[in-house]
Image: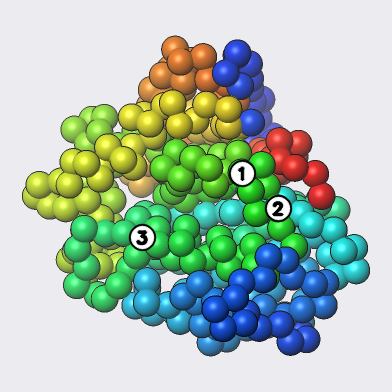
Amino acid sequence: MSKHHPTRRNVLKTAGGVSAALALGTGGVLATATAASAAGDGFGLHIVEHNESDARMKYYRFQTDAIGWNPGVNVLLPDGYATSGRSYPVVYVFHGGGSDQDFTTFDRLGIRSWTAGKPVIVVMPDGGHAGWYSNPVSSNSGARNWETFHIAQLIPWIDANFRTFAEYNGRAVAGFSMGGFGALKYAAKYYGHFASVSAHSGPASLRRDSGLVVHWANVSSATLDLGGGTIYGAPLWDEARVTADNPVERIESYRNKRVFLVAGTSPDPVSWFDTANETQVLAGQREFRGLLGKANIAHEFHEVPGGHFVRPDLFKADLDGVIARLRSA
């Protein structure tokens, strides 16, 4: 991993620069959750499976009209949550695309050890094998409205069932690859939700190179998730949707946020997937950073050796930056 290589680290600082019973009552919303409470239904989410036996990692699977199957979420609590009585900031962490990627990805990578002793709640939801953190233009596989699930349902459900700071300075969003794009998209499109955004090998420019990322989103989603449907429309795109989702066209929406970017500089030349992905990521992030710089918007970036993979050392450093930016527990 990259900790064995020298890291190009740049920080741009500018004037701009961030199971007992508890059920939601009918028609009511609980603003906070007690230390011993179990999660309940609400906000369009009905729990169909759960495991709250682990002291830190809580697992839930929901039925929701937003998604045509039952998506899961892992909620990783800080050490001592059950007895501390404290409220905590939250970071939403999004997985990348692929048939082997889901809400368990970061647990498999070791996020329990990365967060040991850190005063933050980590929420890791499903995002589809190629859901692109979006409501698609079309689907032949039933509802796949990931944006609705994450923003309109999951965030308020988390705030109602766990002791969080339900405010701008209480939330961050981060992700890898497709999830890094999702983080950048949500942070701009829903400005008041997140004070910090991190993209680890996440694309930041949808239209460059004749819209390569848009085409990839359409092809991958049609193949893996939508039964021939697409995220952005084909052959003609929904141009307004592309603009709304495109980080390089939403530059002002990153002002006064903490922005953290990671891209690899030397993808595996034998792997077309690694080369195509990280070459596009690096170019798009450089375009994005250039626009942030021109707008005097603070951001931190790391260009590091290697290709398209999660770098635990930088993810752990990112988590420390998230905690420093957000409201303290």
Q: Is residue 13 visible?
A: yes
Q: Are marks 3 and 2 in contact (CB under 8 Å)?
A: no
Is residue 287 positioned above or below 165 on the image?
Answer: above
Mark 3 or mark 2, whichever is nearer to me: 2
Q: Provide the secondary structure element on which disc 3 rests.
A: loop
Q: Which amino acid does label 1 sit on?
A: Tyr
319 displayed left or right of 290: right
Is residue 255 positioned above or below 106 on the image?
Answer: above
Q: Provide the secondary structure element on which disc 1 rests.
A: helix
Reading the image, the residue beneath label 3 is: 131
Q: Which of 64 and 52 is in front in this view?
A: 64
Reading the image, the residue beneath label 1 is: 168
Crowding at mark 2 (Cα within 10 Å: few <14, some 14-19, many 20+):
many
Q: Which residue is drawn at 53% across and 42% down?
A: 192
Reading the image, the residue beneath label 2 is: 165
Q: Which residue is drawn at 22% across and 46% down?
A: 215
In space, the residues marked 3 and 2 are separated at their CA atoms by 28 Å
Q: Which of 199 and 27 is in front in this view?
A: 27
Is residue 11 positioned above or below 189 on the image?
Answer: above
Q: Which amino acid does label 2 sit on?
A: Phe
- Earlier in the chain: of badge 3 and badge 2, it is 3
The quadrant in which the N terminus is found is: top right
Q: Which residue is drawn at 40% across and 62% down?
A: 148
**Residue 111: x and y, percent?**
69, 57
Crowding at mark 1 (Cα within 10 Å: few <14, some 14-19, many 20+):
some
